[in-house]
Every structure is written in C-alpha cells, then in structure tokens.
Image (spheres, helix red, strand yellow):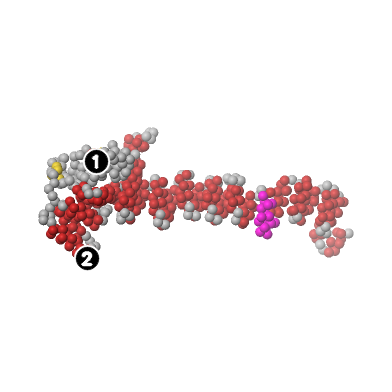
C-alpha cells in the first residue's frame, strides 16, 4: 500500500525506503524505521533498545547528528572507544564552529585531539596551554612546525625556539630569533648547535648592535665568536672616539692589542699544526704561510693593527708624563714628553707640544721649549687670537730668560753599539740607528741598563725601577715579567 502511494506521488526516495523496509526481517526493526521516518526518534530508539540493539540506536543518532545522545548510548555499553572518541570530536567541532572555544576544548581534551586543541588554545590566546602541549607531540609531527609558527607570530621567541629544536630544525629556530630581534639567543643557538651559517648570523647581529649604538656589546659578541680582528677594529675605533679621556682610550687600545695578539697566536700556533697525526713538515710550512696570508688580509684594511700596541704606548706615555709632572718629577716628565712626538698620528699635536713646552719651561730646557712653540705656532686651524696669544707667551718666556735658547748641560751618554753621543730621550742612535726601547715604567730610553720584559705585551722596564711592581705598567698583566 505504501509503495503504491509513493508511486502515485512520484516519490522515488520513498519507494527506495519501502524496499529497504521489506529487506528487514524483523517486525520491530520495521516499526522503528517507520517511527524514525515520521521523526519520532525517541520512539524509534526505544524500539531498538527493546530488542537489545543499541548499535542500531547509535547508528540512528549518528545519522541524525545527535552526538550528545551517541555519547550517552556508548557510555551505557553500546559501543567502543573509537566511536566514543569520534563522538567527542564531533561535539568539539560543533562548539568550535560556533566559536565556543572553552566548551570545544572540554570535548577535544577527552578525545585527545591535539590538532584541534592547538587551534582552540590559539584562538583563545592561551599560550601557556599551547606550550604544555609541545612535549606531548611526537618530534616528527608536522603540527610542531605549525605551533612554532604560531609562537613566532605571537612574539614568544623562547617557546618558538624550544618547539623548533624539538623537531630538530635549528635553522628555523635561529630565523625566528632573528625575526623577533632576539639576536643574542640566535647567536647562542648557532654556537650550541654548530650552525654552519653562523657567520651570517654574527654579521647581522653585529650590524644590529652597531646601528643601535651598542658598540661594546658588538665587541663582546665578536670576542665570544673568536673574531679577534673585528673586535680589535671596533676597540681601536672606539678608542679614537674617546681620545679626550686618555685613560679610557689607553684601556681600549690595550684590549685591542690583546685581541690582535690572540688572533696572531691562533693563526701561527705551529704546535697545533704539528700535533696533527700524519702532518709533514711541508704541510706545516704551507699551513703557516696560509695563516700569514690570512693575517695580512685581516689587518690590511686597518694599518693600526700592524702595530697594535702603538696606541696603548701613546696614551700610556701621555698619562705617565702628566703624573710625573704633577708629582714634581719634572726631569723625568720631560724625557717622557719628548717621546710623544713620535705619536702625532694618535695624539693631538696641540696636546703633545703644549705639554712639551710646559715641561721644558719648568726644567729650563729652552731649546726644547722653543722647538715646541715653533711647532705650536705652525699648527693648522689656529685662529688669529690663539696665534697671537702663543706668540706673546713665547716672547715673554724667551725675553725674560737670560740664557740662550739652549738646554742645560747634561752628563754625556754613549750609544752602547758605536759610542756615539746620544741624549737621554733619544729613541735611536743618530749614527748607527740602533733603537733604544722605552721603559714603560719611567718613560726613559733604555741604553745599557738591565731590563725585564713583560710576557704579555713584550714591553721592557728597567729592572731597578720595578722592584716593588707586581703588574706590567702598560698592560697591567700581573706577575708577567720574565
């Protein structure tokens, strides 16, 4: 009867429905299907349960999308764990589609659906829960990369790094640090995992620091990375900028010199080359030559690195001359001052010759004083007022002194090599050109005195002058005299 009615109505789906009913061999099942057809779902479920067919009741609720009822039926013993998990996922999806994230999370947690939980926690901005999920996800899961990207977008560098490292992607971890301006962390990662492109990371970070005026941090970065040449160049540049503060400039020049020494020692350490098993003498020679070429290339752009201690010497003698002058040791101060004329490329000429003129005046070395005034009056950049003041001062000095413009008679000194007469402050013999090293303790020229050398900076001192000294006067390395 029903089939004929559907035929009359032209309802093809109804005809198929009747055929399915005819295939059912149970009268109760047929009644349940009819009840469901007329949307009496509770009645249909009751009929299925009456014949102890919870599986059919669950199937009915699944077709209806009534997942809450599916959960109830499964929990009452009508299904398996997989079906229960599927039902929880479907309920979570129901709530997430309506942006009810907290309720969705409740069901996704029960279903252990990590992918869905990541989306919900991210939508809520609950990054603490996201971080807690990282350790529960397998290292090979592509979900880790998605989470790391989300952490990076949220500015959570530490979480992003830990996630990338967990999946073994150090490059992405470093890129994330760079993107978030966490340069120090990026360098640390590159060093920790021996990242092959660490040079690029260092260069970018150093540029970032220098652009922000953080020169000292850039120097420290280069030192940590064993980039002694770059560190020395920055230190020397910084020393030039702080020339008005001689003590600070000296310290910076000493640090720059030590960095250059560290680079040289590393490049020319033959003991390391020869310790390699199977290394021949020819190979050692070739490697040493290669190191020399690298050293020349490294220092070629900045010639101050060829003689790195020169800047430290200049400011050391400049400070020493002032201490000697103000402590009343004017004769020693003059000898030290006259050494400063060799450092015109580092110290300001006006500072050098003003100090020489003043000290020479007090010691009555009027020849040296006159030479200093001549030098001062010919300095470029002087205005008329300054030039006139200098001329008047020179005139006053040399017209009020009864002696000629000469230095007082001094005890004769001879060059140990050729017996030619030299002065106390001469840096080399005028006849044989033998150099006289400078005592960094007193500023005196060392001609025949017994000396001791500092192991660190290789500068010498007169032995009699350093009996109570425990540190090198120039580099301040303790107990370093051989």
Q: Nearer the N terminus, badge 2 or badge 1? A: 2
Q: Nearer the viewer, residue 90 or 427?
A: 427
Does residue 33 appear in this view? no
- Is 158 placed left or right of 445 in the picture? right
Q: Is residue 387 above or below residue 46?
A: below
* Residue hosting label 2: 385
Q: Which residue is mark 1?
A: 465
Name the quarter where the C terminus is drawn: top left
Quarter of image, res 393: bottom left
In the image: residue 97, left or right of residue 393:
right
Secondary structure category for the residue under label 1 = helix
Which residue: 21% across, 45% down? 444
Q: Is residue 106 magenta?
A: yes
Q: Per the image, is 282 magenta? A: no
In which image quadrant can residue 448 be found? top left
- Picture coordinates of residue 107 (x, y %)? 69, 51
Q: Residue at x 72, y 51 (%)?
A: 87
Q: In the image, what residue occupies the spot 86% across and 59% down?
A: 3
Depth order, front residue of 192/344: 344
Quadrant for the N terminus in the image: bottom right
Q: Callout 1 environment at 10 Å: few (<14), some (14 to 19), or many (20+)?
A: few
Residue interval drawn in magenta? 93-109
Q: Position of residue 56 (x, y in %)?
A: 80, 50
Give how far apart the Cα atoms at labels 2 and 1 are.
Answer: 44 Å
- From the viewer's side, name the closer residue of 210 and 359: 359
Q: Tell me the residue at 53%/50% (across/down).
A: 158
Q: Position of residue 187 (x, y in %)?
A: 45, 48
Give the percent coordinates (x, y) of residue 9: 83, 64
Compared across the picture, whether 10 is left or right of 139 comes to right
Q: Bin the neighbour count of mark 2 within 10 Å (Cα to Cα): few under 14, some 14-19, many 20 and up.
A: few
Label 1 near label 2: C-beta < 8 Å?
no
């Amino acid at each position: 009867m029903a089939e004929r009615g559907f035929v009359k109505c032209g309802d093809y789906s109804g005809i198929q429905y009747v055929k399915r009913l005819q295939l059912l061999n149970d009268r109760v099942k047929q009644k349940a299907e009819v009840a469901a057809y007329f949307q009496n779902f509770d009645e249909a479920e009751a009929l299925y349960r009456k014949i102890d067919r919870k599986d059919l009741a669950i199937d009915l609720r699944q077709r209806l999308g009534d997942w809450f009822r599916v959960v109830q039926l499964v929990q009452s013993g009508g299904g398996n764990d997989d079906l229960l998990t599927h039902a929880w996922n479907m309920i979570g999806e129901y709530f997430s589609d309506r942006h009810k994230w907290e309720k969705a999370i409740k069901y996704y947690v029960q279903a252990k659906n990590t992918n869905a939980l990541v989306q919900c926690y991210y939508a809520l901005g609950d990054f603490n829960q996201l971080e807690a999920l990282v350790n529960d996800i397998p290292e090979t899961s592509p979900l880790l990369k998605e989470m790391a990207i989300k952490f990076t977008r949220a500015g959570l560098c530490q979480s992003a790094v830990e996630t990338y490292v967990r999946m073994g992607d150090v490059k992405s971890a470093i890129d994330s640090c760079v993107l978030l301006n966490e340069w120090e962390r990026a360098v640390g990662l590159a060093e920790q995992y021996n990242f092959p492109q660490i040079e690029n990371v260092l260069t970018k970070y150093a540029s970032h620091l220098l652009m922000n005026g953080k020169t000292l941090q850039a120097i420290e970065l280069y030192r940590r990375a064993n980039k002694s040449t770059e560190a020395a160049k920055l230190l020397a540049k910084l020393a030039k900028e702080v020339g008005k503060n001689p003590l600070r400039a000296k310290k910076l020049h000493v640090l720059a010199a030590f960095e250059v020494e560290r680079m040289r020692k590393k490049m020319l350490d033959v003991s390391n080359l020869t310790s390699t098993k199977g290394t021949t003498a020819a190979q050692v020679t070739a490697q040493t030559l290669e190191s020399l070429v690298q050293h020349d290339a490294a220092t070629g752009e900045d010639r101050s690195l060829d003689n790195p201690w020169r800047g430290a010497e200049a400011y050391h003698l400049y400070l020493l001359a002032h201490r000697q002058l103000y402590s009343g040791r004017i004769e020693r101060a003059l000898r030290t001052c006259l050494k400063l004329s060799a450092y015109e490329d580092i110290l300001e000429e006006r500072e050098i010759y003003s100090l020489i003129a003043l000290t020479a005046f007090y010691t009555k070395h009027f020849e040296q004083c006159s030479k200093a005034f001549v030098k001062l009056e010919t300095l470029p950049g002087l205005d008329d007022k300054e030039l006139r003041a200098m001329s008047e001062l020179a005139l006053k000095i040399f017209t009020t002194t009864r002696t000629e413009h000469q230095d007082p008679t001094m005890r004769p000194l001879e060059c140990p090599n050729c017996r030619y007469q030299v002065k106390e402050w001469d840096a080399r013999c005028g006849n044989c050109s033998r150099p006289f090293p400078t005592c960094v303790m007193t500023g005196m020229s060392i001609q025949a005195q017994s000396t001791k050398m500092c192991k660190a900076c290789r500068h010498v001192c007169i032995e009699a002058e350093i009996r109570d000294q425990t540190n090198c006067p120039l580099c301040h390395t303790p107990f370093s005299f051989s």
